[in-house]
């Protein structure tokens, strides 16, 4: 990251300017690769079905080690996951090229613009899943992060536990 100007967004309280710049950066990335080319790009790792499988395997090992509230929380989460339909890997919107790793450390803020770095997990994704992966930060003390850009409708509501 020393070759690009900017500081990672991770760990910062995102204000309106940062959120709008983040939305713009993601929208530009989504629109950079034409749809006919996106269809030829391999699926990104960590798709919903892969995550469901990973969580299922993890839960087999971890659930016996838990008890009380933690076990109940796991049971509720696993029950929801079983009903979610995420293992079907169906697209939830237009397919786009996505970075795959929504860690806000991979988004650099230079004071006016956000730049996306780290494409290790990139690939074909759908816009809704890609947008959700890009929101795991906080907006100045709120539990909900909303990304709205006037020229492109990109809105993500993300409840952030403990946020």
Image: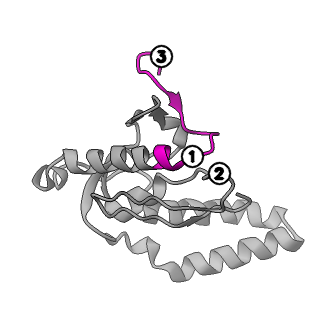
Mark before the other along the chain sequence, 2 or 1? 1
Mark before the other along the chain sequence, 3 or 1? 3
Farthest residue toward the top?
3
Q: Secondary structure at mark 3?
A: loop
Quarter of the image with the C terminus is bottom right
For the residue pair 13 and 17, the one nearer the viewer reads as 17
Specify the label residue 97 is tagged with.
Answer: none
- Percent across and percent down for residue 60 are 68, 65
Work out how far the residue at label 3 is from the one at label 1, CA to CA, in angstroms.
Answer: 22 Å
Height in image: 121 above or below 80?
above
Residue located 60% across and 79% down the image: 80
Specify the label residue 140 is tagged with.
Answer: 2
Disc 1 target residue: 14
Residue located 34% across and 71% down the image: 92
- Residue bounds of the magenta highlight: 1-19
Residue located 41% across and 65% down the image: 155
Q: How is the image coloured?
A: one colour
Work out how far the residue at label 2 is from the one at label 1, CA to CA, in angstroms.
Answer: 6 Å
Residue located 66% across and 74% down the image: 77
Disc 3 target residue: 2
């Amino acid at each position: 990251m020393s070759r690009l100007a900017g500081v990672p967004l991770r760990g910062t309280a995102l204000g309106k300017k940062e959120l709008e710049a983040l939305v713009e950066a993601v929208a530009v990335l989504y629109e950079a690769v034409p749809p006919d080319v996106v269809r030829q790009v391999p699926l990104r790792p960590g798709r919903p079905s892969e995550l469901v499988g990973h969580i299922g395997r993890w839960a087999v090992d971890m659930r016996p080690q838990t008890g009380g509230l933690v076990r109940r929380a796991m049971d509720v989460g696993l029950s929801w996951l079983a009903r979610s339909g995420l293992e079907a890997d169906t697209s939830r919107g237009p397919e786009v090229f996505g970075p795959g790793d929504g860690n806000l450390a991979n988004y650099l803020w230079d004071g006016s613009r956000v730049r996306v770095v780290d494409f290790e997990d990139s690939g074909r994704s759908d816009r809704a899943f890609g947008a959700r992966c890009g929101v795991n930060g906080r907006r100045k003390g709120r539990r909900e992060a909303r990304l709205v850009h006037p020229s492109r409708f990109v809105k993500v509501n993300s409840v952030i536990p403990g946020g």
